[in-house]
Image (cartoon, rainbow, N blue to C red):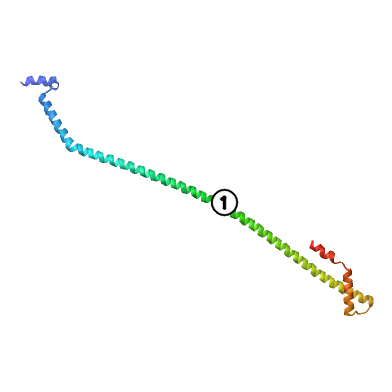
Amino acid sequence: MLASHIPLASSGNFLVKPGIGLMIWTLLVFGITLVLLARLAFPRITEALDKRQKAIEDSIDSAERTREEADKILAEYRERLQEARGQADEIVQSARQMGETHEREAKEQAKELASDAAQRAQRDIEAATQRALQELRREVADLTIAATEKVTRKTLDSADQKRLVEEALSELDFSGVSGSSQN
């Protein structure tokens, strides 16, 4: 009998011939394994996959919210930057206007100071001219008295001196001297 089994094993025909009993047992074990997997393993795997899907969806939602917040912050930043640029332009414009105003005021003040200085100088010149004229009149009067005394060889009293000085002064023309300094 051994010899009869050996040729069958060596020919490999036993794999081709289906055994009904083996098939039933294989299907039965497969079915039990499938039921056990369906009741014990598949729910846990499904639950783990659902949790993983939920975590991924939450991450996507969180990333989307973060992106939207970042967009809002960026928009606010750009708006504030635009406002800051506008304010900077206003400040620069205001500074320019203030500078121009100060420049105008300084020029006007300088003109006023120059005009005041010119007026003071004119008054000083007129006062000096008047002093010089008075000094010249005194000199002329003294010279007239001295010349008169030499010509008449006598000393004049004060009434005669006054009369002679007034006559000499009336003959002199001082209008040309005082009038030319006023121009």
**As drawn, 44 above or below 90:** above
Query: Which residue shows up at 23% across the image and 40% down it?
Result: 47
Work out which quarter of the rendered image holds the N terminus and state it: top left
Q: Nearer the viewer, residue 9 or 73?
A: 73
Image coords of residue 75 (percent x, y): 44, 45
Image coords of residue 33 (percent x, y): 15, 33
Query: Which residue shows up at 39% across the image and 45% down it?
Result: 69
Q: Is residue 51 visible?
A: yes
Q: Nearer the viewer, residue 130 or 149?
A: 130
Query: Which residue shows up at 36% across the image and 44% down it?
Result: 65
Image coords of residue 88 (percent x, y): 52, 51
Give amino acid for label 1: Gln
Give the class, few, some or many, for how many residues have Cα within 10 Å of label 1's Cα (few <14, many ≥20).
few
**As drawn, 160 above or below 116:** below
Q: What is the count of numbered marks?
A: 1
Q: Is residue 143 visible?
A: no
Outermost residue to the right: 152
Image coords of residue 137 (percent x, y): 84, 71
Outermost residue to the left: 1
**As drawn, 179 above or below 57:** below
Work out which quarter of the rendered image holds the C terminus and state it: bottom right
On screen, residue 121 versus residue 2, left or right, reads right
Query: Which residue shows up at 37% across the image and 45% down it?
Result: 66
Q: Which residue is mark 1?
A: 93
Q: Nearer the viewer, residue 163 or 46?
A: 163
Q: Nearer the viewer, residue 123 or 25?
A: 123
- Image quarter for residue 35? top left
- Image quarter for residue 4? top left
**As drawn, 108 above or below 44:** below
Kindly state the secondary structure of the residue where label 1 is placed. helix
